[in-house]
Image (cartoon, rainbow, N blue to C red):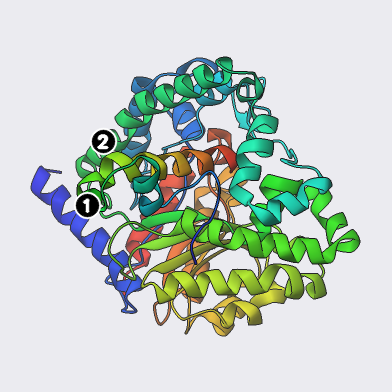
Amino acid sequence: MENNAMHEQSKRRNQNFVDVYEGRIPKSIPISIGIDGAAALEYAGKDLLVDQYSAEEIIEAMDHTNGLFDTDTVVGMSSRLPSFYKILGAVNYQMGADGYMQHPNVPGMDAEDYDALIEDPVAVCWEKVVPKFYKELAKPFPHNVIAALKFQASRQAIMSKLGPASREIAVKYGKVTQNFTGGRTRAPYDLLADTFRSFTYVNGDIRRMPEKVLAAVEALYPLCVKMGMPKVPPSKTVRVSMALHMATFMREKDFAKFWWPSYKRIVEEFVNAGYGVFMFCEDNWMRYLDYLYDLPAGCEMQFEYGDAKVIKEKLGKKHIIQGLFPSTVLRVGTVEEVERTAKEYIDILAPGGNYVFGMDKSILRAADAKVENVQTLLKTVHEYGQY
Amino acid sequence: MELKSKYYSTLEENLKKYDIPAEAAEKAYDSIQGPEELLFSILTFLIT
């Protein structure tokens, strides 16, 4: 396609998202699927163990993968690159034997540190969490400062190339050029669990010291707001993104007391400031659909598992539904199964709008999805997903 | 709701800390508050 045609395609794709976010039915269903940087390198035939240290190799892989797959948005970008974590001596991000970056469950602080967390969460981050997560930053001056400067220099060296390259790739392949993600943050309870106490210990904390957990969630609230609040002018098309982790692993009684109130409040805070909210409802949220319904209208909710018909019926008039297409079909299915399944989800979720086509999860590795299946999926949604 | 911490300062606090006149607030935003905000952004990368 020529440059002009690509420009027009980008405009159409931008507009489809804008229409959904502003409450209109778009001309065609916008597509939001995630393909991780590791998968992009593998699709391009590169070696994770070697090539993910080089911005040039990553850009080549992004270009290859975005040419291979006619996604609406640029895919294959990763910000969790091994050079950063190697320089820092990270224990919270470690490379597996095949070069893939793993994220082990590491508690950033001990139970005795709750009072300090309640007093000043940012101080606990610098004084407790960062030295626990990064061995080089726990060393005495000047070793820690030297490691921090090297980390920032490495990050700047790579990310200053990936950002512009991503924009060039969007233009080259006629993909979305508008930035719809204004910020990323966590639900306050999830931040407590993921960063400070780990998945393992936080559930015990709510039995042994419920008041401290509640106070900690409250103390983390302003930190989470600041992490996510966009720095661009308010618009429903600018989304604050949150991946929701802990809720489905809790009893409903605990969820209602410890998880939900601060989450509802933070969503309202971003919406009242004029922004939209995107949430990845990890795992199965069927028992919490009534809670989700109560959030301010227009939230974009990506679901991993659940009954698409019930989700559409309960939430589809008020919120934007995303996700649910089972990525296993891309790994083990035939192209016919991919096409049939995509049409089934579109038939259920697309009527009336408020829908962005998405999968249950991102493609993390090339082995997760056959090339011909991803191509069939995209072709099907582009052709069948017209309003 | 404002974030309060001994490791995070607002522009007003930074102007006082570095002895910069209040009239320079607008001109000093990028060079004085910019690094404060960048450091906060680096911290969020490190802890998530």
Residue A106's mark?
none
Q: Which residue is mark 2?
A: A164
Of the pair A104 and A116, the residue shown nearer to us: A116
Q: Position of residue A129 (x, y in %)?
A: 67, 38
Q: Please rate how many residues cluster around mark 1, counting C-alpha atoms within 10 Å: few if below 14, some from 14 to 19, many from 20.
A: few
Q: Please rate how many residues cluster around mark 2, counting C-alpha atoms within 10 Å: few if below 14, some from 14 to 19, many from 20.
A: few
Q: Position of residue A378 (x, y in %)?
A: 39, 53
The disc labelled 2 sits on which kind of residue?
A: Pro
Q: Which residue is mark 1?
A: B26
Of the pair A189 and A13, the residue shown nearer to us: A189
Q: Is residue A33 left or right of residue A175?
A: right
Asked which quadrant contains residue A275, the reply is bottom left
Secondary structure beneath label 1: helix
Asked which quadrant contains residue A387, the reply is bottom left
Secondary structure beneath label 2: helix
Q: Position of residue A18 (x, y in %)?
A: 29, 68
